[in-house]
Image: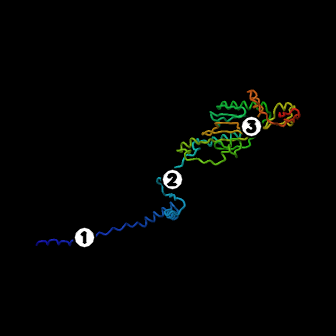
């Protein structure tokens, strides 16, 4: 008996393909991601509201997205430029603080102890007195020698000399170097200046080099001492001997490492006798200043000595 042939299966009809429905997100995954975002950004609803307002230009300022860690657009952000004082040494402020503390401690006791800490001064320090002696020297060793000679000369001429610091001021640039830090050095400094775009530097590096302003320390002091020749004339009576009082201003300029690169005797009043003696030795003309002992006489002119105009 033969086996029956297999019955053919009915033909499959072609049906139009339906678009596949999008895969639905996993609810558990969505909840996990939402909770993670809320832990990282607690104010997520407020951030969404701010984004919605920012898209419709309802915020007066651009919105910064904290979650965006990609590269910033150069049209909206500008890289921070180097400030003129960014070239300072890493230990600049430490060295400046040490120098200020040393000046506070050593200057009042200069006549009894002198200068001890020379590390606060630069190797190429300059000392200048541009008004009376017109003196200028360079070098740390020369500066120390001048300080020792000045201390010995003042101790020889004055008895019981003392130095009191009145005020210490820090300024950037050349402002306030005349001893009055509240007023500008020139009338033009108090007026606002308007710079044209052509005058501004083209690159941050050139502006940092050209507009670097060194730090200056302005020290106002008062010196009191009894002249020895007056003390000898009064038989050593220091109570009845008048004391000389001088007021002056020191200007210390710091370099980029925070060490003193320049020391200038900006002003001193009145002019000490030592300065007048050096001027006389150099042959400079002495300035006549009115004093208490100066008297003015009235000279009478006779009538017959007057100059008459010829007819």
Badge 3 is on which residue?
268
Residue 232: percent from the left, percent from the top? 85, 30
- Number of residues whose C-alpha sits closer than 10 Å to that of mark 2, classed few (under 14), some (14–19) or many (20 or more): few
Q: How far apart in space, not on screen, are marks 3 and 1 (Cα)?
A: 112 Å
Badge 1 is on which residue?
14
Q: Is residue 16 left or right of residue 76?
A: left
Residue pictured at 88% horizontal, 33% vertical? 304
Disc 2 or disc 1, which is closer to the eye?
2
Residue 97: percent from the left, percent from the top? 65, 42
> Toward the viewer: 72 or 174?
174
Q: Is residue 119 left or right of residue 9?
A: right
Badge 2 is on which residue?
77
Q: Is residue 184 left or right of residue 72?
A: right
Residue 280: percent from the left, percent from the top? 76, 28
Q: Quadrant of the C terminus?
A: top right
- The quadrant holding residue 187 is top right
Q: Is residue 22 left or right of residue 215?
A: left
- The quadrant holding residue 135 is top right
Q: Is residue 225 above or below residue 85?
A: above
The first of marks 2 and 3 along the sequence is 2
- Secondary structure, mark 2, is loop
Residue 241: percent from the left, percent from the top? 85, 35
Specify how the rendered protein is coloured.
rainbow
Indicate which disc residue 139 carries.
none
- Number of residues whose C-alpha sits closer than 10 Å to that of mark 3, classed few (under 14), some (14–19) or many (20 or more): some
Q: How far apart in space, not on screen, are marks 2 and 1 (Cα)?
A: 60 Å
């Amino acid at each position: 008996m033969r086996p029956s042939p297999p019955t053919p299966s009915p033909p499959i009809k072609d049906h139009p393909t339906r678009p596949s429905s999008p895969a639905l997100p996993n609810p558990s995954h969505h909840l996990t991601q939402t909770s993670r975002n809320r832990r990282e950004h607690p104010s997520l609803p407020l951030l969404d509201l701010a984004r919605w307002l920012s898209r419709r230009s309802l915020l007066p300022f651009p919105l910064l997205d904290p979650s965006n860690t990609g590269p910033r657009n150069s049209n909206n952000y500008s890289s921070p430029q180097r400030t003129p004082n960014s070239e300072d040494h890493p230990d600049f402020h430490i060295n400046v603080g040490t120098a200020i503390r040393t000046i506070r401690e050593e200057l009042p006791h200069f006549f009894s102890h002198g200068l001890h800490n020379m590390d606060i001064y630069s190797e190429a320090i300059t000392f200048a007195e541009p008004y009376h002696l017109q003196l200028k020297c360079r070098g740390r060793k020369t500066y120390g020698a001048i300080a020792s000679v000045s201390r010995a000369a003042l101790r020889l001429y004055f008895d019981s000399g003392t130095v009191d610091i009145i005020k210490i001021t820090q300024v950037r640039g050349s402002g306030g170097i005349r001893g009055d830090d509240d007023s500008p050095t020139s009338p033009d400094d108090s007026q606002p200046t308007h710079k044209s775009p052509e005058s501004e530097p083209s690159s941050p590096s050139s502006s940092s080099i050209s507009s670097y302003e060194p730090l200056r320390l302005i020290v106002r002091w008062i010196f009191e001492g009894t002249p020895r020749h007056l003390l000898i004339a009064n038989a050593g009576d220091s109570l009845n001997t008048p004391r000389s009082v001088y007021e002056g201003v020191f200007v210390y300029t710091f370099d980029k490492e925070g060490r003193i690169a320049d020391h200038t005797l900006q002003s001193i009043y009145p002019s000490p006798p030592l300065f007048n003696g050096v001027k006389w030795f150099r042959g400079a003309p002495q300035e006549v200043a009115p004093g208490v002992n100066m008297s003015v006489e009235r000279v009478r002119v006779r009538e017959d000595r007057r100059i008459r105009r010829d007819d």
